[in-house]
Every structure is written in structure tokens, then in C-alpha cells.
Amino acid sequence: MWSSPEIEALIARLARLPGFGPRSARRAALALLQEPETRLKPLVEAMQNAARHSHTCPQCGNLDTQMPCIICTDPARDQSIICVVETVGDLWALERAGVHKGLYQVLGGTLSALSGFGPDDLNIRGMMERIAAGHVHEVVLALGTTVDGATTAHWLQSQLVEAGVVISRLGQGVPMGGALEVMDDGTLAAALTARRILEP
Amino acid sequence: MVEWEEPAIVLRTTMYGETGLLVYLLTQEQGVCRGLVKGGMSRRQRATWQVGTLIVARWRARLPEQLGALSGEVVRHCAAPLLYSALGLGLLSSACTLCAEALPEKEAYPALFTEMVRFLSVLSVSPENPPIADYARWECFLLKELGYGLDLSRCAVTGHENGLCYVSPRTGRAVSDEGAGEWRDRLLPLPSFLFDETDGTPSGWQDALTLTGYFLRRAVFAAHHRPLPAARQRLADMVRDYSGAIEKLDSSF
């Protein structure tokens, strides 16, 4: 062993994080330890704060330091549209794009017969309560274009059909800057199925 | 080094580490087999490893009993045309789940593989008309391949080849209306499309799934102390709703 057990423990903890392996964890640990005042201590403080104050929003399932989360309590947001996403990472991606001005619902996963994730495991209670309260006009199903994602979208559609809300899904097909000749046939099939009529 | 390359259908995927995938395949010569796909969760590869995709798979390992490394090239994305069809996806998920859960690993079922490819082709060609009758016949074929085939050739009581409309839940043999007698209530209804290759009727689809579901549950899954897979149960519910909607539509005309 080259270093003390404390430093090895730090490297081992870092190596478990997404995007890190043993070598990159060692480099990160070295960078932190070489500049403790400017890197290590602020990071420790930020992590302690996050650990102390972060919660899962009881309404939408987002991660935030306030309850309900900053999105659910923002009066400037359109309360009549809920965008359903699979994970908090998907929510952050949509927020980064800045295109959705309504609320969110984080499901926490998608229906998967093989992994045993069933309808009871989906976090939809908060959304159903908001729909029942009559504030919601549209539900956007922003789930992945996978078999599980599409199955979940169809299941949610069947659950929401009685609720009297507009149900929509994200468009599927050719990405920005994509050339048709290099697209796989699955993407082309989905794009052709989801084609739009051009308004004059 | 052990290595093979052949057509395969993706049955099931599980995340393995941060970017890897543990993939179960149905192949013609190797049967159900699994392997590790390095970077299977990457943007470039994720579409390849969707359930129901027909691929040309390459598997290699140092020893045959090892997990092995998998790579593959897409032949056909069978799920892509079905993304807007709930029932189509239900049929696809159920067929793949049954193969993954019911078939033993590394035992070849070449005829079943061929039937599965044929069914997936029919399914992906007509997503707006889900081929429920083809699916029910495929389940009968699966039972046959697993050694629990239904005998629909003649009546178990009278020996007649015509008028078969029930199946004995004990023996899996067909029974005619005449032969059913007082046992009629205890027999499972047999829809005619299971042996005459027609498209069937909504009530026939439900009867067929009840029939095959009964034998799958009793003969295949009960032996492993497992229930019928959730995807198959969900499919039965979807077919019931779909059949109900069609019958309602028919009665309104």
C-alpha cells in the first residue's frame, strides 16, 4: 500500500461513484489532498450540506433541499402541464434544455417484467393527486424510446384515460444534425411513424 | 478460445456495472445464452440491445462455461414499429419473457428460434393489427418444444377428428363436444384457430391465452415454483380489454 488507510478509504469511496474507476479516483483524491483549502474542504462542506438538507420531493420525486421542491413551489411555472420522466437525471436534462415550463413527475423507473419493477413501484401518487384536484390539463410522457419506456407510457395512458387530461408523448426520430443515410432502421421507422403534417 | 457467430434475438438485458449490459439471447444453435456487452449502455450501442431485436451475435470466451463477451450487429429492430402499439409491445415482451424464463440455457431449440423469428416478422409488419392468433399458436409451439405439447389431432374420448372444442386440463388432449358429456364445465375451451390457421375471434383469443396460460403455469413454471411471468399476465389483461373493445364496436354496428 502506498498511502495511509484513510487515503485509501477516500480513493475507494470515490471509485464507487459513476464515471470513476480506481485510477481516476486516485487522481481525484490526489487533486483534493494536494489543495485541501481550496478543493477538499469546500467539497466536504458542500457534501455535508447536501447530505443534511437534500430530500426527495413528496409531490414529484425530484431531489432538492426544500420540501416541496423548488419546481413544485415556483408560482411562475405552468401548473396545468406535468412532464413525466423516468429519473431525476432526465428532469435535469429537460431543465437544462429550458423548454418545459410546467411541473414534473419522476417515476423512479420503468415497468420491466424481467427486473420485477411493476406498476406499484412507479411513483405516480403525487401526479394522480394533482390531477384529481383538477389543476392539470396535459400530461407529457417523456420516457425513453425503449421497450420498457414505451410499455410504461402505454400503461400510464391507460391509467390516465379516465382522468380527462390531454396525454402526449415526446416526438421520436431523427436527431438534430442527423443524416438519414447513417440512421439505423429502428430510428427511421420511429421517425416515419411519428411524422407530422406541415401546416401551410 | 471458444467463439461463435450466429443470428440471435435479444430476450433480456440487465445493467452490469456502469456501462455494461448482461444480455440474454435466443440463438438457433446455442439456445438461450448470455454474455457481457462492454459499453452496452452507451449511446451508440443502446439501440442494438433492445428486447426483440434480431441481431448477428458474436460470442467469445476462453472457456465455454464462462460468461463470455458479446458483440452484435443489428439485422432488424422488431420493437421500433411497435412503440405506438401497446398490444404489439405486450406481445413482444411476453414472447421474449417466456423464452428467457422458460427455456433452459445452452440447449438448442432451432425450430422454436425459427418460429420466434417468423412471429416477430409478422408482429413488426402489422403493428396496427396485432397478430394475437399467431402469438397463441406460437405459445402452443413453445409448449410442444418444452415437451408439454397439446394433442389437438383427435378427440381423446371418441377418436373423432372433427368438432374438437375442448381440451382436457389433465392430459392436454382435445375433446369434442360429443365426447365432453357431463365433464364439459371442467374442460378448457379450444378455439378453432389454433389448428386451422385463421385469425380467430376476440373471444377465441381470450380462450386461447387461457388455455396456453393454464399449461404454461402448470407444466412449465410450477415445476420451478414460479408464477406465470408478469408480462404474460399483463398481456392476458390487455387482450381481454382489446377483445372487449372490438366486441363492443361490432355490436354497435
Image (tube, coloured by chain):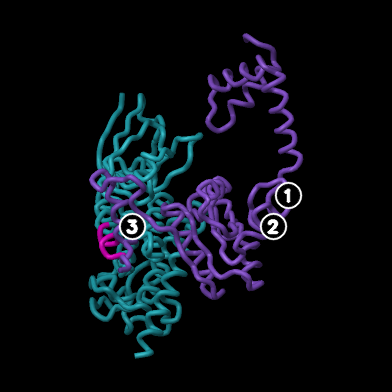
Chain colours: A purple, B cyan
Name the residue: 32% across, 56% down.
A191
Judge left or right: residue B113 versus residue A148: left
Q: Residues within 10 Å of mark 2 (few under 14, many from 20)?
A: few
What subunit carries mark 1? Answer: A
Name the residue: 68% across, 49% down.
A56
Asked if labels 2 and 1 touch by Cβ distance under 8 angstroms, the answer is yes
Q: Position of residue A108 (x, y in %)?
A: 58, 51
Q: Position of residue A50 (x, y in %)?
A: 71, 38
Tell me which corner region of the image, top left, top right, bottom left or bottom right, holds residue B176.
Answer: bottom left
Along the line of sight, the residue nearer the viewer: A112 or A11: A11
Query: Main SS of the magenta segment?
Result: helix
The alpha-carbon separation of the residues under discs 3 and 1 comes to 54 Å
- Quadrant into which the N terminus of chain A falls: top right
Q: Residues within 10 Å of mark 1 (few under 14, many from 20)?
A: few
Judge left or right: residue A161 versus residue B73: right
The alpha-carbon separation of the residues under discs 2 and 3 comes to 54 Å
Which residue is situated farthest in the front direction here? A200
The answer to whether residue B65 is above or below residue B143 is above
Q: Tell me the residue that label 3 is attached to.
A: B142
Number of the label disc, if any, that sits on residue A73: 2
Name the residue: 36% across, 26% down.
B63
Q: Secondary structure at mark 3?
A: helix
Disc 2 or disc 3, which is closer to the eye?
A: 2
Q: Amino acid at mark 2?
A: Thr
Number of the label disc, if any, that sits on residue B242: none
Q: Tell me the residue that label 1 is attached to.
A: A66
- Quadrant into which the C terminus of chain A falls: bottom left
**Range of magenta residues:** B121-127
Q: Are marks 3 and 1 on the same chain?
A: no
Q: Position of residue A139 (x, y in %)?
A: 53, 65
Q: Are marks 1 and 2 on the same chain?
A: yes
